[in-house]
Image (cartoon, rainbow, N blue to C red):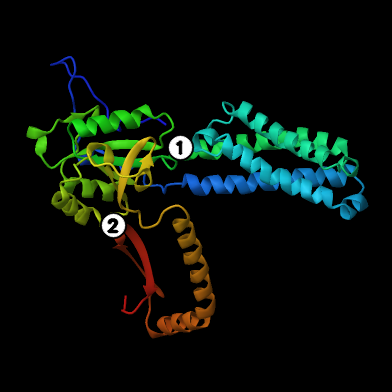
Amino acid sequence: MSNSPLVNIGTTAASPISLHVPRLADFRTTGQSSLVSPIVLGVMVKAVEAILVLATGLAIAFGYVNVQDIGNSWTYAVALVAAALGTIVVFQSFSLYTPQALTSPLRHLPRLVLGWSLTLGLLVMAIFFLKVGPELSRVWLALWFAIGGATLVADRLVLALFTRAWVKQGRLTRRAVIYGSGAAAEQLIKRLEADAESDIRICGVFDDRGYERSARLVSGYPNLGTLAELLAFGRKTRVDVVILTMPLAAEDRINQVLGKLAVLPVEVRLAAENSQLRFCRRAYSYIGAVPMIDLIDKPLNDWGSVAKWLFDRSVGATALLLLTPVLIAVAIAVKLDSRGPVLFRQKRYGFNNELIEVFKFRSMST
């Protein structure tokens, strides 16, 4: 993923190169679309491809093999399930469920074909050593290998249409800002940019020390202002991660910053490379190869956001269904009481100053 800054460095007639540091007003409110979790996406793709492997093998079996033979032999069922699970395991070991692999199917096509060939090859070996070959059709296995492989390739090509659109919308990259400038921030940016597999896109740098003590550009990324402006930026556009580059010993300052950042729905991490104190590896989380200390977790992330989406819609639909008689009675009462619409609609501000639309039964005269 490209980690290029979100601003341009323009030129003027007065000087060969003019460094223009934008204000928050210069940023368009792009990136407001929700983040697609790579973890959830990977699990969904695994489920779809396991079903495709099962469905392809089963369809070929019913089309070529005697239906009665399939029903009387447990070997077909075991072979189908083993191939579906084996495909997931092999593809996972080949890193074929990463966002990079899903958005570039042709580049990863050799690994995909090799993974499917290895899966069916292991299945054939198991059939040979277990001496169940006579119970399974060799033509069925050959057709399954050819048609199943073509189905998986077609699946990846179709999926790439969606993932590429999500990349353009910024939904497969995490938007990060860095708090703190200087040598520590420059070293952090250098390491993040060196990781070709990183899903981090740096939006800019914030620092409370002002332009007198901190540079206007930090490794090519703009210094966008103070912590207060970081909060305003987080309300204007989507920010997923805030990375602090302060030393671990600055406990009071870190606590002050965390207290203010708690109003944003973001992850807050402390770059661990700047600390002389070393913990065991399990104590760190990692963005690429860069060790981080987790300070604040995002309120809803990965499967948490999926669970909330399901909960909101299932409970909301159930409540609407159960309360329908009451809602109809209230609507009739409002309509008979005075002229005007039954529902009153108004825009209000919710969490993180997000503008939401509220519907309620009208309680005043028009």
Asked whether residue 17 appears in the rendered view, the answer is yes
Say few, some or many: other residues with alpha carbon within 10 Å of mark 1 (under 14 / 14 to 19 / 20 or more): some
Say few, some or many: other residues with alpha carbon within 10 Å of mark 2 (under 14 / 14 to 19 / 20 or more): some
Q: What residue sits right under mark 2 in the picture?
A: 352
Earlier along the polypeptide chain: callout 1 or callout 2?
1
> Residue, x 44% and y 36% (percent of image)?
168
Quadrant where the image shows the C terminus: bottom left
Quadrant of the image occupied by residue 42: top right
**Amino acid tagged 1:** Val
Mark 1–mark 2 distance (CA, rounded to whole Å)? 25 Å
**Amino acid tagged 2:** Asn
Is there a contact, CB below 8 Å, between mark 1 and mark 2? no
> Residue, x 25% and y 27% (percent of image)?
220
Please provide percent x and percent y for residue 58: 80, 47
Please provide percent x and percent y for residue 93: 58, 37
Identify the element where label 1 is drawn: helix
Q: What residue sits right under mark 1 in the picture?
A: 167
> Residue, x 56% and y 36% (percent of image)?
161
> Residue, x 45% and y 58% (percent of image)?
304
